[in-house]
Amino acid sequence: MVTERVAAHLAFGVTDARPRAAGEMLKIAFPALLVLATSASVGFHGILSIEIMPDSSGPNVRSATIRDALPGDLGAMFDIRGLVDENRMSRGELAALGLTEETVGARLGSALAGWVAEVDGAVVGYSMSDRPRGCVYAVFVLPAFQGRGLGSALLGRASAWLFESGLARIWLHTDPATRAYRFYLSRGWSDAGASQPSERRLELSVRTPLAATRL
């Protein structure tokens, strides 16, 4: 989860943002990564299966599932928020900002949409988008699973859902000293200026070419 003044602190990639019909097979090729998605419903909902190459520095897994986040996933999502490498926040810190499982759950499925990455049945990452604000609200992946393509798929879902909602331009905030900031710029996001003393507002247009590059 993130604060109201920060839309996304840690993001790992962008997938193809073009709308897809129900049941259409989507193939997005990355170096050492192949995403095969068969949507269970129209738009960017349903199940996305991801096959990734093993990583000797992390868990030896070869596949993961991206699916819609459910209220029952919020506990794991809050746990992940407190375990990431950058911009870690505890449940207490989030609660002080009015962000609890209850307050977020009340908006999930309406103003907010979320997705989780599962490996062997365990949630290891998630993303969220805020439709009224038109922003990517959060993208977080456990450190042991970073650089494996999970963040790319999660961010692709979050971005595509906003574009599918009719938005021509979406945004997020991030610290320019982070890995995320440099990656966004390399993927077509543009720096729209300072939004907070230590944050920049980045924007992406639906017309921006999105390179298929693994982080």
Image (tube, grey):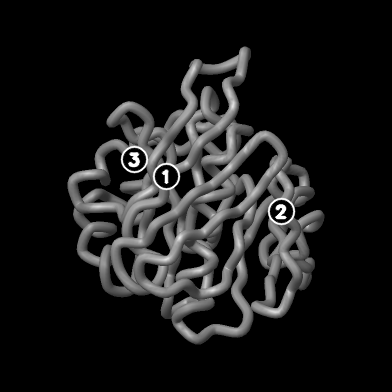
Earlier in the chain: of badge 2 and badge 3, it is 3
Q: Are marks 2 and 1 in contact (CB under 8 Å)?
A: no
Query: In the depicted view, which residue is nearer to us: 97 or 60?
Result: 60
The residue at 61%/70% (across/down) is: 171
10 Å neighbourhood of mark 2: few (<14), some, or many (≥20)?
Answer: some
Amino acid type, callout 3: Phe
Earlier in the chain: of badge 1 and badge 3, it is 1
Task: Identify the mark at residue 49; answer none if there is no mark.
Answer: 1
Spatial distance from mark 1 to mark 3, Cα to Cα? 23 Å
Q: How many marks?
A: 3
Q: Is 204 situated above or below 137? A: below
Q: Quadrant of residue 113?
A: bottom left
Query: Residue 135 at x, y = what percent?
Result: 53, 70
Task: Identify the mark at residue 212; answer none if there is no mark.
Answer: 2
Q: Do the residues labelled 2 and 3 touch (CB within 8 Å)?
A: no
Position of the C terminus by quadrant: top right
The residue at 65%/49% (across/down) is: 29
Please identify the residue farthest to the top as the structure is shown.
56
* Front: mark 1 or 3: 1
The residue at 69%/57% (across/down) is: 199
Q: Is 94 situated above or below 18? A: above
Query: Residue 80 at x, y = what percent?
Result: 40, 35
Q: Name the residue under label 3.
A: 78
Spatial distance from mark 2 to mark 1, Cα to Cα? 17 Å
Query: Residue 207 at x, y = what percent?
Result: 71, 79
Q: Is 70 situated above or below 131? A: above
Task: Identify the mark at residue 121; answer none if there is no mark.
Answer: none
Mark 2 lies on a secondary structure that is loop
Amino acid type, callout 1: Ser
